[in-house]
């Protein structure tokens, strides 16, 4: 009946689509050099209180990750990531395909800490026989739904400064993170505490698009974008969308809704006695279901993903909500789940 | 007043945008595995009379070129291209960034011939000290507006077969080529005579998108796509657009209009005595203008690109028309050009 | 007084050097196509009982690893290695620089097992969103001195066959492994049980050189070699050396001597009460020394490497012996160690 | 009877081999950090009058080229080379395999000039849609035997300074160039006029080895070397050889002899009426021979390479002399050639 498979199951929020329609026949420059992109970038700089930041618009997350990482690293430099990090597991070796090692370290909650970063550093001796870790990659919210606090991000920043590392925050699900219960980070904090981060549109109501905010200058970033096929001919589509998302708070309204639906789902599932190994305040929820129950739900037409097996009879599954998830769909699901056995 | 800078100055044809709006709230699978992509692929296979072909949807031309080339070549293999070929000049070394040499050869009309291909082959001795040319890259229409005839394409196919080469046709402007005066190629010919080609949407009325038709199987093509950041999360956007473009001939109608506007422009400019070094039957026109005239046109608000200098006082400039170019804009331009001196 | 830093502190065994002198003024083909390389390859095929194997000579270990791995993997394919594996830690990201991910997994003794390999496989879902593990990389002896038994290698082979994986054995210290107490592997076993392995010369009495034995054909291996700068102009130097090493058992005699010196060292150090966290039957020994003792030894002029810290006051250090290590040097060292406090 | 195939048909000059034997049992550090390399580097800095230069020792030419080029270029930067340049034609795409485009331009004598460099620059518009040419690669002597004068090199330097380009001189056959009739360049000129160049040992009496002199600092050059498998474990072998080559002028004595033998060959061949399309003052000679004559010489046991066909009956062939070529071999060859018909 309903797909909780991901947060990009629909097209765009109707206001976003309307903005594309409204500007459709304007003639503009290509490649993101148009006034829409300029205005969206200005808006982002303003909301980030980062008047000097560069803003680049990319089409998707893997593209944003690979272009950003390769453009800031020398070939012998590496990026540190949690074992669960998207760049480590779900990008088909995209980072390695640009020549860089991902130094992955296990993290129970999907987050990096100064201690974990320093564990990786301690395994490297600074000689020419080893890669030089040079960047820390984190996601907020993480791939397993957790979020960073301001204190945690500040601690990472301090650690990066101490060791000469760049800090890159993958914000594919940034909206959900910034509107989650317990969050105390705002856009200006991200601009101040990271070297670069992106505001993810694809997973929060845009047709597509990620807005990368770079506070550590890189004069040739667009050369790297082009070389990786990451400059969209009609770049305006990105500018138009991000203006629509950000000018009146639509971006955060949508994310807040997604989180509310996720919390409703979590409460309901937990009330039925199913455990959640990791507590997620964001729009991804990971309960453990008996395989028999999961199969009944699928038979009813519900879609969701298996995250990892627990044992022969149980699986951690993933439910994702979005700006488009109706409360009725959640309630019906919970009713149907209650009927499973 | 009007921009002849390129054929992606506007958004999408209204019917394309409408199709996106009509399907906007449907829930579908991500990554192009949805029914819209399936239906668009079926439509393309049918129109190409290539029931066994693989169809992949990519976001843009550079992305399509780099993924296709690297996925079909071993690391020591190279691609042969005309010196003017997009992959040789206008992709910031995207092909080389995937590890492959582009063996470029000068061609006066932007087209490759068996003789040119064999000139490149003759410079390679088949030993392990040299790259092994393994693919021929051509564009139709070419970067300077010319088109291939069926006989020319068949001759290249025969040459490729003789030498064990793959033939890849970049169809970023395929619509314009296939509807140009003098063209005798149709989609089924392209499927039969090339190993892979694409139907360009970005430059002919889509928001974005290129539909790659592959008749030489490559079971892991999607792995290569993902590794290069080239799988769109909401892949359905590509399927929906290509259905709208192809189901009732809109794609060819738009291209025919663009060509007509280009011919109108060409006739008018030629009538004023300005020469065209290369005859183009497609939507790019390359007259030689005195620099003084070019500057007057720019002062009037016309936009177009300089292609290359002829001498200190003259430049080859490029005018591009599209599905969206009004006849009135062309006529006004010609009137304004006539007034220049 | 003496360097136990590594097994390449000297030049070559005098017989190897003599062979180079004896053939010095012969004119031969370049690039390893000469009769010495041919004869050395025949000798290796014969000693491996692998008449169909390809034999390639490379200059060093990192070069051999990177050329071999990249030449057998498609760009989206990855190699599985122990966390301690040379390709994972000590090659400055050489494998990633060719575009491939190293999937590393912790192993307490530096060896891979079917269970560890399958743990890595279980983290990959076979979809286009993840790399495809395609090769298993092991070292014998390992980077921490341990060796594989025939049963262990056969189990890995069976595991690889079951999962469609290639098995690559880095034999930089193969001589030491094959002559170690407890070893039951011989060259023909390696040829039969792996897809490719190399007989390391650099660390066992050659000036340089690794002889790669490939039983899974790769017609273009030399193209990959050349592209990575790994075809030596005077390739004969490799053929001459491997003939000298292998024709009368010199290779194994030297390795046996190195092992005997290592055992002498180990017994002596253990007798003084210093622990060895991992038991190594080969020419690398890893005792834990108090940092005060390590500093006294260094002050006496002994050279060796720190492997990893144990706590603030103790370090795992590495002592390496070679074909050139005199028993007197070991005995003197043990006497000096006994006097440390 | 005699191979004129190349200048690396023999081992090393006996004095070089003796130096290796004399130092064979010394214990030293690995990786080129030993005192021999230090002393050789000091000697080179002194002979180049470049006390601040970095000196790195690499094993061969392709390796030296690929490590140098990739370590000095950002990924979107390209290297300009003559069409005949070794990096363009004879390295199996080694430069592209590190991600960089080689911008090749035809040059009748194998040399680049400011005009040719500027022709390449003029084809690039400085935008993010094109690679940024950043380095000029030249060879001295060139691949077709010609040499640069000091005035020509100074003009290139001035051109590079004007355009912000690095100048890299491949000196695989530098000895032959610097001792050729008409040469007015010395080592200090090369250090002053290039950003980096190498003194080729492989083709002038060493077993192997190229000494790279870098006057534009690159603090992480050794990281790049290691990542490409280009740090020799027993790096001392390179230091020992270059000391032997350079300390008493042996390097230039050998090159002078090779040139004399080449001139003797050229005079003799020309006297028999065979034309030389390009005049070479160095140790490679390229006469045009009738194919019937070439076949007779091969039947007599002479070895040499075909360079390129002239017509169906004639071929440009290549004869290479070296430090080891006896005058008697040249004279006998000329006698045999005179007898051909």
Image (cartoon, coloured by chain):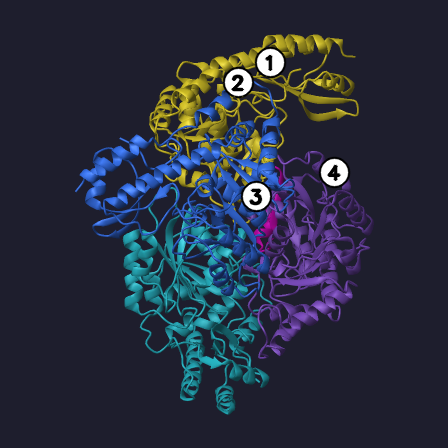
Chain colours: A blue, B yellow, C cyan, D purple
Q: Nearer the viewer, mark 4 or mark 3?
A: 3
Q: Furthest-left residue in view? A: A341
- Residue situated in front as seen by the camera: D260 or A96: A96
Q: Which residue is mark 3?
A: A188
Nearer mark to the viewer, of 2 and 3: 3
Q: Chain ID for label 3? A: A
Q: Residue at x 32, y 61 (%)?
A: C193
> What residue do we see at 44% from left, 84% from top?
C265
Mark 1 Cα-neighbour bin, 10 Å: few <14, some 14–19, many ≥20: many
Numbered tag placed on residue D118 in the rendering: 4
Same subunit, tags 4 and 3: no
Q: Nearer the viewer, residue C190 or B116?
A: C190
Q: Position of residue B332 (x, y in %)?
A: 67, 8
Label 4 close to label 3 by CB (< 8 Å): no
Q: Position of residue D178 (x, y in %)?
A: 76, 57
The nearer-to-camera label among 4 and 2 is: 2
| Residue B42 lies in the magenta-colored region | no
> Residue at image x 22%, y 33%?
A300
Query: Does label 2 lie on the same chain as label 4?
Result: no
Q: CA distance from mark 4 to mark 3?
A: 46 Å
In the figure, B141 relative to C89: above or below? above
Chain containing mark 4: D
Which label number is shown at residue B262? Answer: 1
Q: Which residues are magenta?
A: D292-311
């Amino acid at each position: 009946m309903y797909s909780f498979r991901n947060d990009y199951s629909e097209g765009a929020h109707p206001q976003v689509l309307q903005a594309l329609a409204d500007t459709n026949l304007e003639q503009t420059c290509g490649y993101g050099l148009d006034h829409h992109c300029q205005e969206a970038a200005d808006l982002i700089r303003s909301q980030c209180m980062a008047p000097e930041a560069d803003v680049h618009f990319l089409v998707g997350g893997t593209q944003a990750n690979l272009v950003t990482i390769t453009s800031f690293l020398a070939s012998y430099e590496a990026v540190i990531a949690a074992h669960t990090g998207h760049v480590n597991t779900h990008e088909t070796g995209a980072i390695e395909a640009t020549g860089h090692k991902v130094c992955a370290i296990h993290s129970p909650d999907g987050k990096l800490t100064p201690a974990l970063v320093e564990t990786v550093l301690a395994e490297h001796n600074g000689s020419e026989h080893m890669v030089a870790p040079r960047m820390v990659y984190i996601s907020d919210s993480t791939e397993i739904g957790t979020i960073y606090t301001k204190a945690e991000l500040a601690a990472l920043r301090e650690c990066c400064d101490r060791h000469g590392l760049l800090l890159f925050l993958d914000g594919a699900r940034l909206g959900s993170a910034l509107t989650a219960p317990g969050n105390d980070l705002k856009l200006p904090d991200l601009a101040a505490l990271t070297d670069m981060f992106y505001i993810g549109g694809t997973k929060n109501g845009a047709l597509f698009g990620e807005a990368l905010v770079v506070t550590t200058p890189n004069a040739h970033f667009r050369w790297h974008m082009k070389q990786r096929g990451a400059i969209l001919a009609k770049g305006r589509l990105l500018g138009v969308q991000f203006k629509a998302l950000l000018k009146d708070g639509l971006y955060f309204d949508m994310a807040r809704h997604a989180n509310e639906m996720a919390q409703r789902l979590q409460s309901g599932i937990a009330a039925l006695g199913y455990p959640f190994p990791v507590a997620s305040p964001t729009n991804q929820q990971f309960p453990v279901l008996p395989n028999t129950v999961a199969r009944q739900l699928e038979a009813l037409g519900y879609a969701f993903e298996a995250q990892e097996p627990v044992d022969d009879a149980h699986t951690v599954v993933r439910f994702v909500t979005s700006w488009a998830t109706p409360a009725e769909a959640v309630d019906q699901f919970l009713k149907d789940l209650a009927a499973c056995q």
